[in-house]
Amino acid sequence: MNGGAPLDRDHGLHLLRQMLLVRRFEERCVELYSAAKIRGFLHLYIGEEAVATGVMEALRPDDAIVATYREHGHALIRGVPANEVMAEMFGKVEGCSRGRGGSMHLFDAERRFYGGNAIVGGGLPLALGLALAEKKAGRDNVTACFFGDGAVAEGEFHETMNLAALWDLPLLFCCENNRYAMGTAIERYESQTDLALKAAAYEMPAWSVDGMDVLAVEDAARKAVAEVRDGGTPCFLELRTYRFRAHSMYDPDLYRSKEEIADWRERDPIPALTARLEEAGLAGAGDVEELEGSIAEEIEAAVAFGEAGSEEPVSDLERFVYWEGAAP
Amino acid sequence: MSPPVETATTTYREALREAIREALREDERVFLMGEDVGAYGGCFGVSRGLLEEFGPERIMDTPLSESAFVGAGIGAALAGMRPIVEVMTINFSLLALDQIVNNAATITHMSGGQLAIPLVIRMTTGAGRQVAAQHSHSLEGWYAHVPGLKLLAPATLADARGMLGPALADPNPVLIFEHGALYNSEGELPSDAGAVPIEGAAIRRSGAEVTIVAYGGTLAKALAAAEQLAAEGIEAEVVDLRVLRPLDSATVLESVARTHRAVIVDEGWRSGSLAAEVSARIMEGAFYELDAPVARVCSAEVPLPYAQHLEQAALPQAETVVAEVRRMMGADG
C-alpha cells in the first residue's frame, strides 16, 4: 500500500510511463529476437516493472546502480536512452557498451549505471566497493544493488551483507524475489523463504514489499533510501514479484503451472496502476492512449537507430581490454 | 665522478612495506584492505606497523570473505579510489576468482571502454616452506591466461620496492605475486630506491651460451645455476620475466637469438604452464635460432607434499637447472 504522499496525476502518469516503456521495449525485443535481429541471451523484465520503477524514484542522479542480466528496464528507467540500449541489443557501436556487452551488460558511466552483471551474486561485492568509496570520500551517495532471489543462496550475498553491516556502508540491497532461480522454485532451494529474515542476522533494517504495486515499492524505497543516506546503515528490501515470461528465450517454462502464471498476471502492476489512476479520477483512457503513442514512437525510433547503427570494425576487436589513455 | 649512492640493508618484506607506506603517504585515495593486514600486521608481516601509522580507515582488516573484499576493491576502484587488496595466498585467491576473472578483467571491455579499474591485488605464491598442498601452489600461470589483467612478479628487492607505485598508477587491475620464500631475503637497496618500470623483462646476468628464463621465486635458483655453470665454463644468460602479462617476448627472443639455447624455470606445474607459453613463443619467434630443443624445469605434477625431502624433490632446483643445461650442451656437442 502507498503510505506516502497522496498520488497526483503527474507522478502517477510518470510511473505508468516508466513501466509501460519497459513493457513495450521488452515486447519489441521478443519480436526482434524472433526475427533474429538480436541474439544471445535475452532476459525479460515483463511483470517486474514496478520494482525498478519504484526503487529508482527514490534515487538521485549521483547515486550508483548495480543491476543484473535482467536489466533493460533498470537502464531505461535510469535514463539510459532507449536508442543506446536498443543499439546495444543490435551489437552496434552506438550501443551503450559499444556492442561489447549486449543484453546482459548494459553500462553507462555518466549515469553511474555499473551493469549489467551476469554472474548471479557477482554484482554484490562491486556494489559494496562503490558504497565503500562513497563513504571514504565523505559523499552521501547511495549505491543500490539489484539482485534476484537466486543470489541469496550465493556466498557472495552473505559476505556482502556482513561487510556492508559491519562497515555501516550506504548500500541498499534490492532483492527482486520472483520466486525462481531460473527454473528452481524458491521452496526447493532455500531453507528459509522469508528473505527479509536473512537481513536480521546482520542486524540490518529490512522490509518485504509487494513488488507488483509500484506505489508500495516507491514508498518503501524512499524510507529505505532515507535510512541508508542519513541513518548510516545499509538496508534490505525484499520486493516480491513475478516474471510473466520464461527465464530466457531458451526456456520452455516447464517448471511452473499455467494457473500460477495466470494468477500472478491478475496482479500485473501496469493495469493495477492504471485502474487506481482512473478510479481516483486522475487519468482517463485518453491519457493511457497518449502514453502508448509516445512510447511506441520512442521504441520504433530506437529500433531504427539500432538498425542503422554501425558495426565496430574488426580491426578494433582488441580495444578496451585495457584502459585507453591516462588514468582517470 | 658521481657521488656514492647510500645504501641500506633491507629485506624483501621491508621493501614491500616501504612501497605501501609511500603509496599511502602520497595519495589519499590509496588504502590497504585484506585479512589480518591491520592488528596482526599481515600474515607475512608485510604491513606491520602500518595500522598504527595510518589508522583503521587506511589499513582495513577484513573478514574471511575473499570474494567480497576483492570485489569491494574493484567497486572502490570504479568509484575513483586506489585500493591495494591483499589476499593471504594465491590458493585463497581462488575464492575470489569470480571477482578477478569475471569482473576485474572484463568490465573495462564489457563497458566499451567507459570504466577503468585502477586496482592492485597482492598475494603470496609459491612453495618451499613445508606448508603442503593448500598453501604452496604457483597458480599465477592461470591468471596469466586472462586478458584484462596485468601480472607482476617482483623477484628482487628493487622490484619489491618499486613495482607498487606504477601498479597503482596503472588504470587496470594489476596482480602482484610475492613468492613466500623471498620475504626474508636480504640485501642492499639504495636509500633513494623508488619506482621501476612495470613493462618488460630484465636480463639479470649476461652469458653467451644458454638463456635461462625465470621469474619470482625461481630467479635466485636460476642465478645460482648460472654461477655453477660458469664454474664449469658454461656462460648462461638469466632473464627475469618480471611481468607475467603482458609477456615481454622480445627480450626472451633476443636473448635466445644470441645464445641459441633456452631453459625455462617455472615453479608452476609443467602442463599448461607459463613455461609452456614462453616455450611456444620461442618456437614461434626463434625456432631457426635454436641449436637444441627448448627445455623446461617445472614442479613435479603432484599436489605439493609436506615432507621436506618430497617438497624439495617436487620443486625446480639450481641443480636440476644445471643438469638440464649440461644435458642440452652435451646433446648439442
Image (spheres, rainbow, N blue to C red):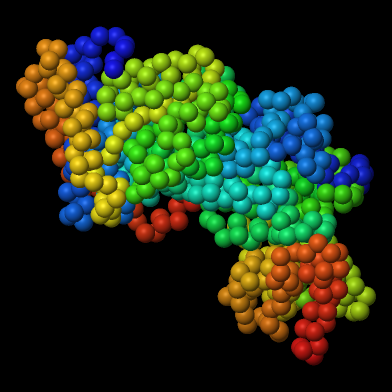
Towards the viewer: A160 or B85: A160
Going by the picture, which residue comes out furthest to the top?
A6
Give residue B27's quadrant in the image.
top right
Residue B195 is left or right of residue B221, and the answer is left
Towards the viewer: B52 or A237: A237
Whether residue B179 is visible, yes or no, is yes
Q: Where residue A181 appears, x then y in whole percent?
A: 38, 45
Q: Residue at x 39, y 41 (%)?
A: A186
Whether residue A99 is visible, yes or no, is no
Q: Where residue B175 appears, x then y in whole percent?
A: 64, 49
Q: Does residue A287 lie above or below B150 as drawn? A: above
Q: Residue at x 31, y 26 (%)?
A: A210
Q: Does residue A142 lie above or below B286 as drawn? A: above
The image quadrant where one finds the N terminus of chain A is: top left
Towards the viewer: B291 or A236: A236
Q: Where residue A214 appears, x then y in whole percent?
A: 27, 23
Q: Where residue A238 appears, x then y in whole percent?
A: 40, 29
Q: Does residue A179 lie above or below B274 as drawn? A: above
Give residue B122's quadrant in the image.
top right
